[in-house]
Image: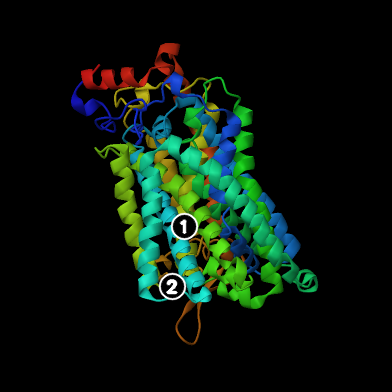
Amino acid sequence: MSDTDVDQGLPPGQGSPQPGLIEQQGIDVIDEPARTARPRDLFMPWFAANVSVFGMSYGAFVLGFGISFWQAMAVTLIGVVFSFLVCGIIAIAGKKGSVPTMVLSRAAFGVDGQKLPGALGWLTSIGWETTLTILATLATVTIFDKLGWAHGTAVKILATIVIAGTIVAASVLGYHVIMKLQSILTWVTGIATIVIMAITLPKVDWSAVTALPAGSAAQMVGALVMVMTGFGLGWTNVAADWSRYQRRGASSGAIVFWNTFGGSVAPVVLVTVGLLLSASNETYAGHVAGDPIGALADLLPTWILLIFLVVAVLSLISGAVLGIYSSGLTLLSLGVKVARPVAALIDGAILTAGTIVVVFFATDFLGPFQSFLITLGVPLAAWAGIFCADLALRRRPYDTLSLFRRTGRYGRFDWVSLATLVVCSVIGWGLVINQFAADASWNNWQGYLLEPLGLGKRVTDESGAESWDGNWPWANLGVLVSLVLGFVVTYLARRGVVRRQEAGQTDTDENATAAEVRAAIEAGA
């Protein structure tokens, strides 16, 4: 086999974990002795990454769709739990293959075909970790100003350097350091967040909460889609990165449960509190768009602002660390020839640049953030549907060697999966709209299927600004359609393909070690 017959995603030094401070484990298989994690160990990283007080801001975002409190509660519970359930299902693949999510996805798309969804996944991860860094920086600037310590450009620069540097440093150190860090952050941020919620809850005006009028089904769907894309669906492309350290015999049901429970429990509580506060205080709800976390500081007494800042920043850093670690792995899966720590540094440089642009030059946060979620949420939902269907069709673990061989059983390209991804994305983008045309005009091309299907009409006001008439355009049906369509088409169209791939597969194929994978690739076998 020639050099072009194998995937070139294993840079020098990428083998089993090496001794020393910085872990070198890359995208190759986790050897059996290193797979020591238990399903319940998944709770800590998923909880710590999603316990951020930023979750309270979603209360304002959800009520912005014009629905009642009880409708918003139903949307929150269903959207959060279902989206993390998808992550839990994908996490099963990590146990079965012991490699990162985007390497496992090669079984569905082909070794080279995976580069398309891999690039989308990398952009999604970069976007999320940059968003979290931006939020932490804005929160620091706001709290410093409220405490009377300092304000202006100097604080922004210092906050950006410290926060971005901390995120990059932790992600470079690797899995074991991150897991220890997350176990500490889980307790610190969890307890402090409870205290902060206890302080803000007396400000709830229950009469104002219950007075909110009910919205339509379309408005509820729109809020549901935003919650799904804002929470679990945004993690699907990295959901198996942590479960790859699970033993092959670990319970799949337990992996799904701890993943879903760990990711969901904090957001459900946080968004609920955010709903109560947003319905009670219009000033707070309006401030969320410009500075989601800083807005919450307006409701807190001065004595707790410093504690609030520490908690807010640590919780955001926690999520960003998971994101940049996984985005580095995704970068390696695209064929970039660097060690994993270097990949994390590359992503860290991009993260820092993005933070600088938004913090120093952007006038609003919510508009670009929402547009980012919906635009990448459509193809990511399609990919998640395809991946879950492919996983559901498989009766055996993955053929480890074939995940790295272009001539292996998964081949170079799976044209059915690639076509499904493209078609689902095209259909999905046609069923979503840019709800923030003024702040993200680059997204105004979306929604092209709504008028032909009679679901809405594009209108222009006296000032020349474009908008949409009707409720369904705001529902962003494209995300749900892409997810369901991706799953159904794949499940029906690739049954025979998966059966042929698994024909003749042996235990030896499934249990290759990292050394055997490398030896086979280097020998061209």
In the picture, the quarter occupied by the C terminus is top left
Q: Residue furthest bottom?
A: 462
Q: Position of residue 475 (x, y in %)?
A: 59, 61
Q: Residue at x 60, y 46 (%)?
A: 187
Q: Is residue 145 above or below residue 122?
A: below
Q: Is residue 435 above or below residue 504?
A: below
Q: Position of residue 397 (x, y in %)?
A: 48, 21
470 displayed left or right of 206: left
Q: Amino acid at mark 2?
A: Asp
In the picture, the quarter occupied by the N terminus is top left
Q: Is residue 506 above or below residue 317?
A: above
Q: Position of residue 88 (x, y in %)?
A: 57, 37
Which residue has dot 1 on it? 132
Which residue has dot 2 on it? 439
Q: Residue at x 27, y 18 (%)?
A: 519
Q: Position of residue 387 (x, y in %)?
A: 49, 36
